[in-house]
Image (tube, rainbow, N blue to C red):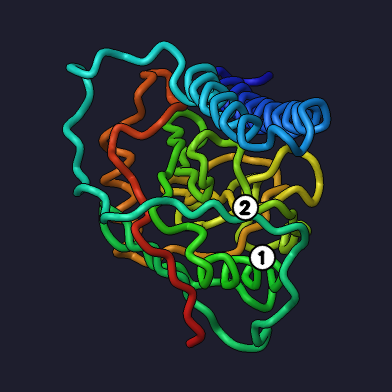
Amino acid sequence: MVSQEQRRRQLAREKFLRQQQRRTSARRRARMRNSVIASVLGVIVIGSVALYTTGVLKNDDKANASSETTPSATPSASKAPDPCDKAAAGSVKKLSWKKEPAMSIDTSADYTMKLATTCGDIGIALKTAAAPHTVNSFDFLASKGFFDHTKCHRLTTNGIYVLQCGDPTGTGSGGPGYTIPDENLKDKSLTGGVYPAGTVAMANTGQKHTGGSQFFLVYQDSQLPASYTPFGTIDAAGMKVLKKIAAAGENTGQGDGAPNATVVINKATVTKS
């Protein structure tokens, strides 16, 4: 007989997967719409097309944030105080590539990633040998400043306990323009259908090999299917930062929304040990 707690966790997992799929569909619709606009209006009015497209994307971003990230937000007066500092000066770079970067890391070496956030530094030991494509992609993206000034847009506090980051649009639908293969899905740490606290793993659309730049940091053991590439482990100081963010809650009061804490990655760096 399925217990109430098991049922609650199952529903949380199903909700997590549905939202990933909705974000993928929204991204595909936006790409199709932009393609149609370009073909109809032509090169002569490319300036007008650019302005119109920008407006459409802004509206889409707001819709995504409303329906997926911040549905039925609670009044600001009930939110916990923001435990984080103001973001560093700068803006998100608009970068995109057509294919995965060529392998350039030393797969036999150790690499670490540092996320210098508004809430504190999060250090991550990367699993280079087990997830070489993923680590190589993060090394590439970090070197280009792809993650700098981006917001961590999602916090889950019910059934699944993760902070999701890595989307330059902040909507849950952005990425680097390419995808990378799933890796390390039989990692020994993933036992009993649980991603343990301290794990860093790739987000995806629910389909195989659809990881891009979005990733999640697990601050408490979370039951998830072993379909999200685990590629790093958070250090002790980073776990304290994550728990501080989680303690501030999310803005829907339903266990899945934008974090109340203003979590911005001021700078991401990948270093060879």
Residue 29 as seen in the image, left or right of residue 252: right
**Amino acid residing under circle 2:** Met
Residue furthest toward the front? 44
**Amino acid residing under circle 1:** Thr
Residue at (81, 47) in percent of width and height: 208
Residue 5 seen from this side:
no
Q: Which residue is mark 2?
A: 202
Numbered disc 1: secondary structure: helix
Q: Residue 77 appears at what percent x and percent y? A: 17, 17
Question: Which of these two is toward me, 97 or 193?
Answer: 97
Q: CA distance from mark 2 to mark 1?
A: 8 Å
Q: Residue 62 appears at what percent x and percent y? A: 49, 22
Q: Residue 194 appears at what percent x and percent y? A: 60, 46
Residue 50 seen from this side:
yes
Numbered disc 2: secondary structure: strand
Q: Are marks 2 and 1 in contact (CB under 8 Å)?
A: yes
Q: Residues within 10 Å of mark 2 (few under 14, many from 20)?
A: many
